[in-house]
Structure formats: structure tokens, C-alpha cells
């Protein structure tokens, strides 16, 4: 790949993972929902939009909103019976739920249409890239990058607005325990459901963008490992800080990809290198949890403007 | 596949799971967090045994024993390096840490051994075949070792000073610490027992099937499921949970739901309706979710007041 | 305002509340006293919905509370403080106060984007009120400090200020003066009495400080081992034999009770 193309690819990855990271940060950083099944939203968004576009011949934009809706619905529905579970049990449940989603797509190849060689373990290929015909092969990546960045920007603005609002205040209070928000008249469960739906929706957007960029989706792209990579981004970048979440995505994507080139300088096999990269991520998580629980960018303190009548 | 065969398969699986879930539950009980790296420690044991067995040419039995003990000691070192500093940290943070640890361990093994499946060098075995079932000597050993380990643990818990201390620390950690029962010492023993058993369980699975770096991940949800189903923190619960899950997984695939749904042929021709084998991993996941929703404390778990 | 009717509660075989019944009249301050372990906190938790009672009924403003979730009871106008202050550590003092008003428009996701001006207006109102309350509980210097950095006594004041922000009709105060320095206690007494006189708030207060009880309470209810043993004005209670006995004897009574449970 040429250098420019590679950088555009990196930027697109940063954008997609930035959205995933913002979504997980909303759930965990702000609300204390330790979602170990984040990849399920990613997977559902990717598959839903793919099926809408390939099987039902819908335009990309329908795929995008469809993916978002399916993932949001999944987040909401999963949370209904489970949201009040203790946090470590909930983490395990979400992990299990995400695996069930993946196994579903692994087994049910009929969702991709009648062709026996499409879907299931074979994955679904030939996903059309939106508005491809308007651009040359050379310029298209830039267009797609623009699309991704618009989505990232929109996600950031929406989540930021929410976390700075009274809604954000309530979920932050829920983060540290149910008792106080309950005593103040907040319907804790409903807030959790909303956060899961929101988190799901954004995860779905990321999934759709991923599917249409790669042109191919398959169940083994959505292993639990993906969830933990996003966790690394949230932790390293900064819990409960939206800029931090995006920053974390940037850092981890760079880290993950720059080690590709080591192969040319150090005689290591591709597989070994991939594994070592993951070892480094694992160690990074451990170190971050031990010494840098707050991440590189700290949570912002909320300061309010003094009302004019009180300014001394 | 006869009924008897399914029962045998269930008991074998239950024995393997029990070795793993027992360790998970006692660590949760004393250290108060769900260790996502538990099954990865087991895999470390699996590969150490592989090294001893294939590279150093040791017979599988001493290899398994040495590997299990060594991994048990290794886990103590890891505890000192990582978890000791987090004794009073919130559950999620420690869980995420254990997750990072799991990723690191799993991929270190993968980096060294690659992603291809391997097998122990085990003397050839002739299975016992009857009209109704088939069982290999290895499977018999798995059942025996599993049962023996459970009995051993029971004896430890109720007839030794350590066991008494463990039970005290489990019932009331603050009181135990205040009355001079050295909690750190107990923690050391708990890790050792938990991970030695887990490694043994992993090695047995490796002997029965095959060895892959990601086998820890493949087994983690069933192990969690068994542990939680029986009541997390209760060692007998872990054993019970393993038993229930071993049967559930195997009978889940065996049962012809078509027959049940059509009331045994009363409602006309029955088409076979089985859970597809591709969903076997999903069985434990679904059971886990259902258990957590209906009775989070598990079958033998303690109730929290509120 | 509040009616507690024959409430029973046990924890794993140990009886914490044994047929407790009493009424709290609107616009009064009622004290709830009793030696440690007499069931006062349990009662508070049951009234506010955090614990489930085994038997009996609670009526708030004439409505049966049944098994209502705590937040619904809070929305009906019941406010409470906790014995061990529940304060989100990662939120500032001011933020804590702003959290308290009920049914804020900005708490709905759609409203955040569809009704920004209304939210801004509400927020200005809340800020004004918050500043007043901050001055009342003398925490205005610490307004941008994380709640986690406050001392125990300051956290209590924060809890009080916070619940005041929510305009409760009935206020359950759990040991409001514990850990608070004596000069401030005087101000608190004035503030609490003010709540009753000027805002008509009904108050049920658990306290160990008998001076405070005498000064502010219209009526006092005394619990011992989960049973109501006396009820009356502070004067009457001070002279009540059963009450004195309860506070003096402790351990022998405990043995007797367990043997006969």
C-alpha cells in the first residue's frame, strides 16, 4: 500500500474505533456498566447493514440507520432483564450474550440469502461501497474517510452533549451506586436501559462503517478480543472523558498497526508478531489498571457558571 | 449414540469442568473477584506439560503433575506482582486487570507455540467397547482423578487447619483478619490449590481432545457457568454446577425436541428437532444467562440481605 | 402525613422490628430514638423503600406504599439522608446539589436535544437555589471540590443540602448532627426548625444527641429491640421509666430477648 493510502486506512480505523470507544466509555466510564460484550453491537451493526444492502437492496444510508437501530434494540432488550445485576455478573452475561450473537451468525447462513456459499462461516462478501462510482479508485478512500469522520464527529457531539447535561449527571451518580439516585427519585433502571440503547446504536454505526469499508463480514471478525481492544482504548485514553476515548482509540490503532513494519526489520513470522502485539495490549491493560486507572486524560470536573446575582 | 454413552460423556465433561470451576470459585470466595485469567493459567499448565512431555521427553504422568504444581507456584508469583496491590480495589477494575492478564498469557503461549493444534505423546490406549457404549482408559482416569480431587479438597477443607482458616476467611473476612488468621497466607494457598487443580483439568482436556492456545477462552464461559450455577464462592456448588452443566451440554444435543414438542408422536409424524451441534458452546452461555436472571446466587449460594 | 402500621422485619431469624406502629403528623418534627440496634435505621430503610418489610403497612400521605421502589417513593415527596453518607465521590459538591431536583427536563435524552432553552432556564433556577443552600450549610467554599474529598461532617452537611434541593414533603434525617462541629449544630437546629415553620416540611429525625432532640422535636418515639416502648413529648420521654431502663441496661435485656424470640 502506498504511504498515503496507508495513512488514510489508519485514519478510517481510528474513526471507526473512536466511535466504538466513545460508545463503551459512555457505558462504562460514565454509567459504570462494564460491558464485556461490546463486540455484539459492532457485529449486529455490520451484519444488519450488510443484509439490508445486499439482500434487500437498500441504499447505504438505510443500512446505516438499520444497523444502528438493530444494535440499539439489542442493547435495550439485553439490558431489560439484566441491568440490575451486580457488575461482575453483568460483565459475564454481556460476554456470553455477545458470543451467542456471533455463534448465531456463524450457524445461520440463511440470513444472507439463498446461496449456500454465502453467510455462516463463509462470511458475506461483495458489500458495495457507498457512492463508489462517483470517485476514482485513488480518491475514493478520502471520501470514505470523510464519511467516517462525519459519523465520528456526530457521535462525539451527541455523547458529549449528553454527558454534560442533567442526564449525564444522573448516570454519573448511578456509576457509584444505586442508593443515592434512587433516594433522589431517579428511575435507575430506565437510565441504564437508555444508556445501553445509546451505546448499542453507536456501536452499530461503527459496525456498518466497518462492513462497507472492508466489503466483507464474517463471524471471526467479531471475536471477544475486539471488545477487549476497545476496553484498552477506553482505559488508556481516559475513563469518563470523551476526548480521552477518541485519543485512546488513536493510540491503540497506531500501536497496533505500526508493529506491522517490524516484520521487515526483525525476522519474526506474521502470526508470532500478531500474538506479541496482543501480549503488549494485555500488559498495557494490566499496567494501566495498576498505575493509571484514570487513563492518560483525566475525567473533567464539572464547573458551573456563577449566576449573576451571586457574583461577589 | 445411546443414552449410556451420553451419560458417560456427561460425567467425563463434568469431571473436567469441576477441576476448573472449583479453583475459580475459591479464588472468588477469598479474593472477591471473578478471575478472567483463570482458564488461561490452566492453559499455561497445559503447555508446560506439553514442553515437558514432547521436548524433554517426560512421560505424560510426571509431566502433568510437575506442570500443574509449577503453574500453581507461578500463579502465586503473579498474585504477588499484580493482584496483591489491588486487594481493596473495586471488582470491575480487578476483573479488567485479569482480562488484560488473560490476553497477555494466551498470546505469549501463541507467540511461542503458534496457532496449530498439538497433542501430548501418550501411550496408545484401547477403548473398552460394549454394545451400548465406548469408553477409553483416559476417560476413566478423568472421572477418577476428578472425583479424587473433589474428595481431597473436601478433606482439606474440613480436616486441616488450613481448611478451617479458609472457611473462616470465607464466612467473615474482617473477623478472620482481626483474629489473627493470616489472610495473605491463606491467599497464597488458595491460589496454589486453585491453579494446580485447574492446570490438571486443562491437561486432561488437552489429553482428551487437543491443545490450542485459545482453548482457555473456549472453556471460560462453561467454567464460569458451572461456577455461578452452583453458587459462586461455594466449592460444593462448583462441583454441583459442573455436574449439572456436563449433563446439560451433552443431553442438550441428544434430546430430540421434536419428539417432546409433538408429545411423543401423539401429534403426528415427528421430525427430528435437535439443537444443532454448532450451537453446543451456546448451551452453557444460555444456561448462564438464565441462571443469573432467575437465581443469581446459584443453587447453593448464600443470600445477601437487602 | 406518615403512618406506620404494625411493621415486622427480620433478618435471617433475628427480629429487627416487632410490630412497630406510629403516626407522624404533617408539619411536625418527630424524633426517633433508642439504643444501638433498636431498629431505627431498619425502619428508615423500610419507609423509604430500600428494605422490604415482612409484615405491616406504611402509608404516606394516605397512600399505601406496599412494595414501591425507592425512587417512586422519593418522587411522591419523601426525602432521606443516609447514616453513612452516600455521596458520589467523583462529583463536585455543587454537582451533587444540582442532581437533586426531581423530574428535570434535561434528564430525558430527547429533551437534551429538543428543548435546550428550557433546560438552560431550569438550570439557572437550580443554580440559584443551590447557592442559597450552599450558604445555609456553609459549604460554599467547597462548591467545586469533589465530594470524595470532604470530611465526614461535611459529607453530612452535603447530604442535608442535597435533599433540601429536592423540596421534600416528608424528610427522614438519619443522625444529621453526628460528626458536625458544635457551632454548626446550632445553625442546623435553626435551619431544621425553619423548614418546619416556613416551608411546612414534616420531619422524622433519628438522633443520639438528646439536646438536639429536646430542642427541635414536637414528639418523640422510642424504640428498643425493635419494639416501640414509649411515645410523647420530649419532656414526657425524659421522665419515662421504661426509656431510662432501656438506655441503661443493654446486655442483660439482649439475652432475655434472644431466649424468647
Image (spheres, rainbow, N blue to C red):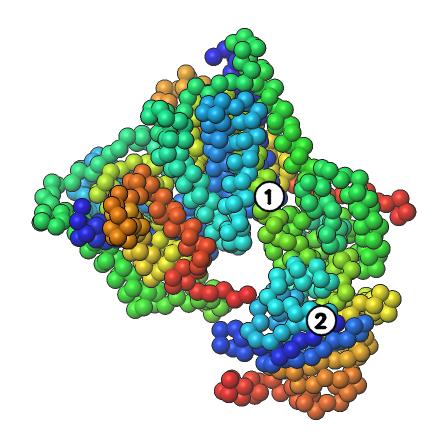
Give the image location of residue B180, x and y in percent.
46, 67
In front of the other: C163 or B200? C163
Q: Quadrant of residue A14?
A: top right
Q: Quadrant of residue C172?
A: bottom right
For label 2, the residue is C62
Give the image location of residue B110, x and y in percent.
34, 32
Give the image location of residue A247, x and y in percent.
60, 30
The residue located at (47%, 12%) in the rendering is A1
| Side of B158 where A205 appears, left or right | right
In the rendered structure, find residue A195 and report the number of the disc placed on it.
1
- Disc 1, SS: helix
The residue located at (53%, 27%) in the rendering is A63
Chain bearing mark 2:
C
| Side of C71 where B148 appears, left or right | left
The residue located at (71%, 80%) in the rendering is C221
- Disc 2, SS: loop
Q: As drawn, which residue projects farthest toward the bottom?
A: C241
Amino acid at each position: 500500500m502506498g504511504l498515503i493510502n496507508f495513512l488514510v486506512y489508519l485514519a478510517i480505523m481510528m474513526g471507526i474505533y473512536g466511535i466504538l470507544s466513545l460508545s463503551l466509555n459512555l457505558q462504562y466510564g460514565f454509567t459504570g456498566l462494564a460491558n464485556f460484550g461490546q463486540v455484539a453491537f459492532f457485529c449486529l451493526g455490520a451484519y444488519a447493514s450488510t443484509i439490508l444492502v445486499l439482500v434487500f437492496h437498500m441504499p447505504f444510508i438505510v443500512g446505516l440507520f438499520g444497523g444502528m437501530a438493530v444494535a440499539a434494540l439489542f442493547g435495550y432488550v439485553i439490558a431489560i432483564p439484566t441491568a440490575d445485576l451486580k457488575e461482575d455478573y453483568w460483565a459475564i452475561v454481556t460476554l456470553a450474550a455477545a458470543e451467542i450473537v456471533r455463534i448465531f451468525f456463524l450457524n445461520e447462513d440463511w440470513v444472507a440469502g439463498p446461496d449456500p456459499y454465502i453467510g455462516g462461516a463463509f462470511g458475506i462478501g461483495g458489500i458495495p461501497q457507498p457512492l463508489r462510482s462517483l470517485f476514482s479508485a485513488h480518491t475514493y478512500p478520502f471520501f470514505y474517510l470523510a464519511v467516517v469522520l462525519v459519523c465520528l464527529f456526530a457521535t462525539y457531539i451527541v455523547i458529549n452533549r449528553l454527558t454534560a447535561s442533567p442526564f449525564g449527571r444522573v448516570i454519573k451518580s448511578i456509576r457509584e451506586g444505586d442508593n443515592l439516585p434512587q433516594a433522589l427519585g431517579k428511575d435507575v433502571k430506565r437510565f441504564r436501559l437508555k444508556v445501553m440503547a445509546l451505546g448499542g446504536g453507536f456501536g452499530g454505526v461503527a459496525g456498518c462503517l466497518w462492513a462497507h469499508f472492508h466489503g466483507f463480514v464474517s463471524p471471526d471478525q467479531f471475536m471477544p478480543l475486539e471488545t477487549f481492544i476497545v476496553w484498552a482504548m477506553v482505559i488508556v485514553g481516559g475513563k469518563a472523558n470523551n476526548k480521552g476515548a477518541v485519543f485512546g482509540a488513536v493510540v491503540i490503532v497506531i500501536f497496533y498497526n505500526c508493529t506491522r513494519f517490524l516484520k521487515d526489520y526483525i525476522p519474526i513470522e506474521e502470526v508470532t508478531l500478531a500474538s506479541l502485539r496482543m501480549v503488549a495490549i494485555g500488559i498495557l491493560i494490566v499496567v494501566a489498571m495498576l498505575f493509571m486507572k484514570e487513563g492518560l486524560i483525566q475525567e473533567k470536573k464539572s464547573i458551573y457558571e456563577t449566576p449573576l446575582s451571586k457574583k461577589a | 449414540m445411546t443414552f449410556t454413552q451420553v451419560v458417560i460423556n456427561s460425567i467425563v465433561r463434568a469431571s473436567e469442568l469441576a477441576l476448573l470451576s472449583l479453583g475459580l470459585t475459591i479464588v472468588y470466595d477469598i479474593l472477591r473477584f471473578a478471575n478472567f485469567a483463570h482458564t488461561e493459567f490452566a492453559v499455561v499448565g497445559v503447555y508446560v506439560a506439553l514442553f515437558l512431555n514432547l521436548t524433554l521427553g517426560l512421560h505424560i504422568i510426571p509431566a502433568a503433575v510437575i506442570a500443574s504444581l509449577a503453574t500453581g507456584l507461578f500463579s502465586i508469583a503473579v498474585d504477588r506482582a499484580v493482584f496483591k496491590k489491588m486487594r481493596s480495589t473495586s471488582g470491575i477494575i480487578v476483573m479488567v486487570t485479569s482480562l488484560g492478564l488473560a490476553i497477555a498469557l494466551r498470546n505469549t503461549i501463541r507467540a511461542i507455540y503458534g496457532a496449530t493444534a498439538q497433542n501430548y505423546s501418550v501411550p496408545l490406549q484401547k477403548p473398552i467397547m460394549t454394545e451400548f457404549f465406548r469408553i477409553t482408559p483416559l476417560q476413566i482416569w478423568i472421572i477418577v482423578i476428578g472425583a479424587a480431587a473433589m474428595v481431597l479438597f473436601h478433606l482439606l477443607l474440613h480436616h486441616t487447619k488450613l481448611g478451617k482458616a479458609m472457611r473462616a476467611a470465607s464466612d467473615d473476612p474482617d473477623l478472620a483478619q482481626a483474629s489473627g488468621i493470616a489472610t495473605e497466607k491463606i491467599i497464597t494457598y488458595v491460589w496454589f490449590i486453585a491453579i494446580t487443580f485447574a492446570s490438571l483439568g486443562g491437561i486432561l482436556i488437552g489429553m482428551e481432545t487437543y491443545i490450542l492456545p485459545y482453548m482457555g477462552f473456549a472453556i471460560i464461559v462453561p467454567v464460569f457457568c458451572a461456577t455461578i450455577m452452583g453458587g459462586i464462592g461455594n466449592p460444593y456448588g462448583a462441583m454441583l454446577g459442573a455436574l449439572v452443566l456436563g449433563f446439560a451440554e451433552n443431553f442438550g444435543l441428544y434430546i430430540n425436541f421434536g419428539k417432546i414438542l409433538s408429545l411423543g408422536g401423539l401429534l403426528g409424524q415427528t421430525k427430528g428437532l435437535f439443537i444443532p451441534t454448532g450451537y453446543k458452546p451456546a448451551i452453557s452461555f444460555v444456561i448462564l444467562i438464565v441462571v443469573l436472571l432467575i437465581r443469581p446466587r446459584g443453587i447453593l449460594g448464600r443470600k445477601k440481605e437487602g | 402525613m406518615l403512618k406506620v402500621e404494625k411493621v415486622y422485619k427480620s433478618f435471617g431469624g433475628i427480629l429487627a422490628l416487632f410490630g412497630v406502629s406510629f403516626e407522624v403528623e404533617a408539619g411536625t418534627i418527630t424524633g426517633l430514638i433508642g439504643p444501638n440496634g433498636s431498629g431505627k435505621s431498619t425502619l428508615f430503610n423500610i419507609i423509604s423503600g430500600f428494605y422490604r418489610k415482612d409484615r405491616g403497612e406504611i402509608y404516606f400521605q394516605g397512600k399505601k406504599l406496599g412494595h414501591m421502589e425507592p425512587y417512586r417513593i422519593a418522587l411522591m415527596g419523601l426525602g432521606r439522608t443516609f447514616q453513612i453518607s452516600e455521596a458520589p465521590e467523583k462529583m463536585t459538591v455543587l454537582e451533587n446539589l444540582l442532581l437533586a431536583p426531581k423530574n428535570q427536563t434535561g434528564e430525558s435524552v430527547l429533551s437534551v436535544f429538543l428543548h435546550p432553552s428550557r433546560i438552560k432556564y431550569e438550570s439557572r433556577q437550580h443554580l440559584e437555589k443551590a447557592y442559597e443552600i450552599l450558604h445555609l450549610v456553609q459549604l460554599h467554599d467547597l462548591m467545586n471540590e469533589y465530594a470524595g474529598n470532604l470530611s465526614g461532617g461535611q459529607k453530612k452537611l452535603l447530604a442535608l443540602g442535597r435533599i433540601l434541593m429536592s423540596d421534600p414533603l416528608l424528610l427522614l434525617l438519619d443522625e444529621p448532627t453526628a460528626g458536625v462541629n458544635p457551632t454548626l449544630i446550632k445553625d442546623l437546629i435553626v435551619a431544621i426548625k425553619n423548614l418546619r415553620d416556613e416551608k411546612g416540611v414534616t420531619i422524622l429525625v433519628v438522633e443520639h444527641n438528646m439536646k438536639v432532640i429536646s430542642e427541635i422535636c414536637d414528639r418523640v418515639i422510642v424504640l428498643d429491640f425493635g419494639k416501640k416502648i414509649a411515645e410523647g413529648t420530649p419532656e414526657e420521654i425524659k421522665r419515662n421509666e421504661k426509656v431510662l431502663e432501656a438506655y441503661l441496661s443493654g446486655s442483660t435485656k439482649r439475652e432475655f430477648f434472644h431466649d424468647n424470640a
